[in-house]
């Protein structure tokens, strides 16, 4: 599969934002503006508390639902945790795994992320695995070593046929307004695909969609999507405005050949 045939995808990571009323207001504006979009895949990742309400509002549309995290056990005495089966039950198609905020603020390790990835796949959820280097690691010339380790450990034990997506999110670009240069993001995405080739084989590696995340805005999205190994974006701050996020979706749609 070439980059022209990997379907473009935009994911809104709402992180810890919105209450029911504000989420419904968002959807009123957003749904209308993306009604005609068919080629681009649109995914919304609200917090757990809004999955049901958002899921209900987008049920009859082409918009898909994602969760921002999951726990790896199916059920049991795990106070406060949410399983893959529970997410599936609410209509989720995707789940974000290993976001840098979870790694940094909640101590998630590659081993834990590997278990979460496996649990998502077992429940037939598509995991979006997030990887990325810190500024310190980049300055020390360790970007590729970090990406390689995060990728290898997260994917350990996975059958090459299992479907997942990778989000390259350099930690220093998240929520800072300082996006990676498109060429830098492409260099990492190309490296990730090359590593996937050795883990999964040529055919599967060509198939895996790689997203860029980190200060993506209306004004820079297109420059990332033009890169041959970047198939979409994982958008935080700029996805909180339904007009901006809809504009990004429309931009993407215009770039997809019919
Ligand atoms: P920002 O778009 O706010 O930089 O966040 C990126 C991100 O973390 C998406 O998961």
Image (cartoon, helix red, strand yellow):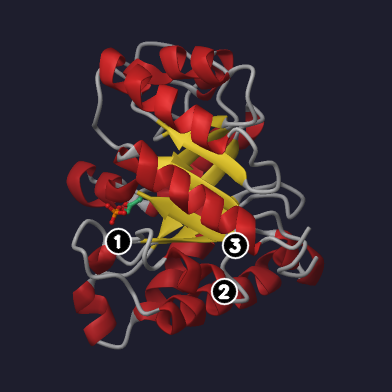
Q: Residues within 10 Å of mark 2 (few under 14, many from 20)?
A: some
Question: Which of the two labelled residues, at mark 3 and mark 1, occupies the earlier sequence position?
Answer: 1
Q: Residue at x 30, y 39 (%)?
A: 240
Q: Residue at x 56, y 68 (%)?
A: 230
Label 3: element kind? loop
Horizontally, residue 162 falls left or right of residue 187, namely right
Estimate the spatial distance between the alpha carbons at disc 2 and disc 3, rounded to whole Å. Answer: 9 Å
Residue 130 coordinates in the image, percent (x, y): 43, 54
The residue carrying mark 3 is: 231
The residue carrying mark 2 is: 226
Q: Nearer the viewer, residue 149 or 98?
A: 98
Where, by quadrant of the figure, is residue 243 drawn?
top left
Where, by quadrant of the figure, is residue 201 drawn?
bottom right
Label 2: element kind? loop
In front of the other: label 2 or label 3?
A: 2
The residue carrying mark 1 is: 215
Residue 40 coordinates in the image, percent (x, y): 64, 48
Quadrant of the rendering where the N terminus is positioned: bottom right
Q: Residue at x 60, y 74 (%)?
A: 195
Q: Residue at x 55, y 37 (%)?
A: 34
Residue 171, compared with residue 92, is above or below; it is below
């Amino acid at each position: 599969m070439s980059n022209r045939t990997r379907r473009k995808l935009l994911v809104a990571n709402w992180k810890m934002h919105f209450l029911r009323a504000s989420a419904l207001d968002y959807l009123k504006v957003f749904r209308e503006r993306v009604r005609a979009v068919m080629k681009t895949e649109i995914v919304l990742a609200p917090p757990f508390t809004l999955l049901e309400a958002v899921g209900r509002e987008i049920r009859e549309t082409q918009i898909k639902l994602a969760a921002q995290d999951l726990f790896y056990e199916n059920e049991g005495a795990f106070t406060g945790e949410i399983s893959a089966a529970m997410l599936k039950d609410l209509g989720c198609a995707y789940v974000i795994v290993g976001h840098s905020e979870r790694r940094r603020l909640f101590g998630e390790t590659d081993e834990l992320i590997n278990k979460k990835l496996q649990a998502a796949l077992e429940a037939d959820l598509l995991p979006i695995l997030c990887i990325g280097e810190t500024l310190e690691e980049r300055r020390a010339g360790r970007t590729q070593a970090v990406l390689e380790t995060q990728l290898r450990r997260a994917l350990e034990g996975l059958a090459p046929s299992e479907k997942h997506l990778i989000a390259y999110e350099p930690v220093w670009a998240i929520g800072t307004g300082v996006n990676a240069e498109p060429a830098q993001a492409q260099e990492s995405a190309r490296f990730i695909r090359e590593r996937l080739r050795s883990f999964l084989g040529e055919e599967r590696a060509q198939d895996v969609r790689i997203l860029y995340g980190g200060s993506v805005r209306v004004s820079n999205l297109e420059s990332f999507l033009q890169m041959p190994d970047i198939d979409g974006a994982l958008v935080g701050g700029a996805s909180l405005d339904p007009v901006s996020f809809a504009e990004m979706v429309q931009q993407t749609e215009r770039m997809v050949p019919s």
